[in-house]
Image (cartoon, rainbow, N blue to C red):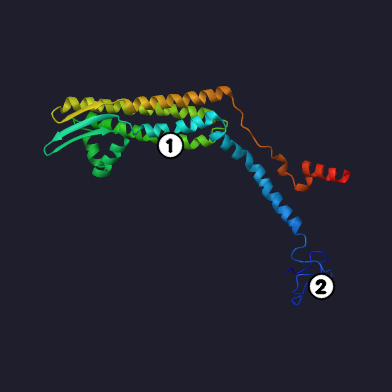
Amino acid sequence: MAAYCPKCNYKLKLTDWRPECPKCGVNVVYFGIEERLREEADVAEYHYAVNKPKYDRLKFSLIGHPLAIVRLVIGVLPLLALLLPMGRIAYDLPFNEHKVTVNLVSIIMFFVKNGFDLDALTALFGSALLGKAVICFAVSLVSLALMALVMFVAYLLLTLSAAPRGIRRNIAFPIVGMVLATVSFVSFAVMIATLNAAIPDVFSGAVIPVCYIAEMLVFAAMIAVNAVYKKKNIPVKYTDVEELKLPYNERPSTLEKKKAKVEA
């Protein structure tokens, strides 16, 4: 119980166990509760009004326009395109003959089964016979991993598309992806050609450009969608909540209601 009555300021004693003030009879617990609730509501509504534009930009960035929905769908396709084949390789060693279609899954499974021996890979860089192929293989893998990382980050940053530099960022990421995809594909093709020439009795391989072509088409589509979006200059649709930043009793809508009530 409060030390003093909130209405008459009577000092309450330990024997004043009832909820009513013994002097003025007001309920000490519930006195002014409407005002307190209104103050708490004002604070909550103020924070809502401050953050609402951010929510509006987030919603508009993702689903606020048909082009935004298309952009959201296309954004995940570069990662899915990595599941398409990059090439086929076959090697014939004593008691070990193997053929595999190379894509992101087969590359991951290869390292899961065989591990990643960085020392052995580094040692092969200086090999006169296989050095060039190993270097190209490493460049291809690193470029592929960077491309996947860049596009994953780009997909997350679609939530900021309505920011001042959002569209330019959305266009820049696919361009970077194109460069990395090209480096990866060219390096992989050089590796295949080098191994075919160096150890033809053991290794045979061929490039399948399906993955690369798909990536280029998806990146081009991403750039085109964002370019159209920028050209249309589609404005963000904000909900007008400015009056919620004011206390309830000072809001124009509240004052109008009070005025209408008085006139009635």
Q: Position of residue 124 (x, y in %)?
A: 21, 35
- Residue tagged by mark 2? 22
- Residue 264 lies, in percent from the top left, at 87, 44
Q: Which residue is mark 1?
A: 152
Q: Residue at x 22, y 37 (%)?
A: 123
* Residue 60, quarter of the rendered image: top right
Q: Residue at x 31, y 25 (%)?
A: 209
- What residue appears at the point 22 percent right and 31 percent down from the top-left corner? 89
Q: Is residue 84 above or below residue 31?
A: above
Q: Amino acid at mark 2?
A: Pro
Q: Residue at x 47, y 25 (%)?
A: 223
The CA span between labels 2 and 1 is 68 Å
Q: Nearer the viewer, residue 195 or 213?
A: 213
Which one is in front in this view, the residue at disc 2 or the one at disc 1? 2
* In the image: residue 236, left or right of residue 113: right
In this view, 21 is above or below 247: below
Q: Secondary structure at mark 1?
A: helix
Where residue 80 sits in the image (x, y, percent)?
38, 34
In this view of the protein, which residue sits in the foreground, 172 or 223? 223
